[in-house]
Amino acid sequence: MSWDIPVLKSTEEVPPLALAKWFLGFVFLLVIIFFVCLVLYYIGVSKLIFQYGLISGIVLFILFGVAVGWHVLRISSFSERNELILLSNQRVESVCRAWMSEYITVADFSYVFPDSIEIDRFRRGEQFQVIGEKAIKFPENVNYTALFQELLCPFRYKLIDLLSRGKLEINFAAQGELINPLWSSFLFACKNINISVPETENTVFIVNQFSEKVEEWLESRSEKYRLVVFCNPLLVDDPQATITDGACAWLLAPTVGPDSSPGKFRMYRALHTEEKILKSDLNNLIKYQDGMNHPEVVLFSNVKSRSVVNEITYQCNLALRSKTNDGEIQQSFSHLVIGQQGVGNIWMAVTLAYLKSAGSSVVNVVASQEDVSLTLVQIRSLPYNKEQL
């Protein structure tokens, strides 16, 4: 479901003070009273007519003072009420902005794709072979233990150190019935490279959607690092070879406590939405989340609806042009780089989005689709990490 953003209260229209009109009206009535008294005096109605006129002027002055005072009090009441409403709205917006702008730091990461995917050329900004609407598979005799070893080796020493201090939690994601055999291969891989087998209480199998899992990580404050492993081997449950294989691993920094790791990139709170409410949800994302008021790159992953692509592009362009008059976002499509994607495609898409802009401070937005569900997440590369890739 989308974020439940409180509806801001609207202010009331404050009528103008317009004291000049009130004063002119008062003077006009005094002039009328004077001329009426003058006419009646010459007619000879009464010699006390000017006294009556003076009394009438005093009564008119009192009525004028009461009316003006009531009008000023009414305007003051409206203004004070509007000021309280604006203050309340500012507090709501401040809370929403702080909540939506929470992020997780990815301290390190690695990935493994079939050899025919030129991911390194893509990372370096060189020309690469476009895959398009087809699936690239691992060899039929792929050894998943060796695959996990390759995946974990880039930060092997970090994992050994964190496990020895009890500071690591394993989050493992795979497709349905493949979890058990893949988990066994993962444990064998850990053993082969001298990484201690994680304890049961420090192991989590990811079954929730990506946005829900990010929400859980942000809400459940922890001093532990989290190793997130996503594997999409579909040799068993994809007999028609319709979806590209691949694996990625992220080492997430603790959400509380001191963190000495500079990190590779930040991953902000993810938005889960649907096409029919995309416009309002995306508007809230741009309005409240830090950095989303000037998105520069949008990576689309498995997004089939052209109207979704157009809506996201249009709103992101509007946001960017509010900062730079001639700005226009860059569009990227994950299937051009790694081929056709399926369930859980956003894990790979976030990795690709970082690789595209590693070392720069541009704001990346990843838009992923699974059936009717859409997920949008902002990632932002941290400085001085280009040489660490």
Image: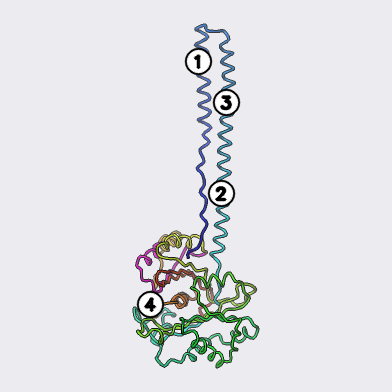
Q: Position of residue 93 (x, y in %)?
A: 54, 57
Amino acid at circle 1: Phe
Give the label on residue 178, or none: none
Q: Which residues are magenta?
A: 290-315
Amino acid at circle 4: His
Amino acid at circle 3: Leu
Give the label on residue 63, or none: 3
Q: Residues within 10 Å of mark 4 (few under 14, many from 20)?
A: many
Q: Secondary structure at mark 3?
A: helix
Q: Position of residue 308 (x, y in %)?
A: 38, 66
Q: CA distance from mark 4 to mark 1?
A: 90 Å
Give the label on residue 335, or none: 4
Query: Mark 1 or 3, which is nearer the eye?
Result: 3
Closest to the observer: 174 or 147? 174
Q: CA distance from mark 2 to mark 3?
A: 33 Å
Residue 156: name its quadrant.
Answer: bottom right
Precedes in sequence: disc 2 or disc 3: 3
Read off the residue under disc 1: 35
> Which residue is most to the front?
177
Read off the residue under disc 2: 85
Precedes in sequence: disc 1 or disc 3: 1
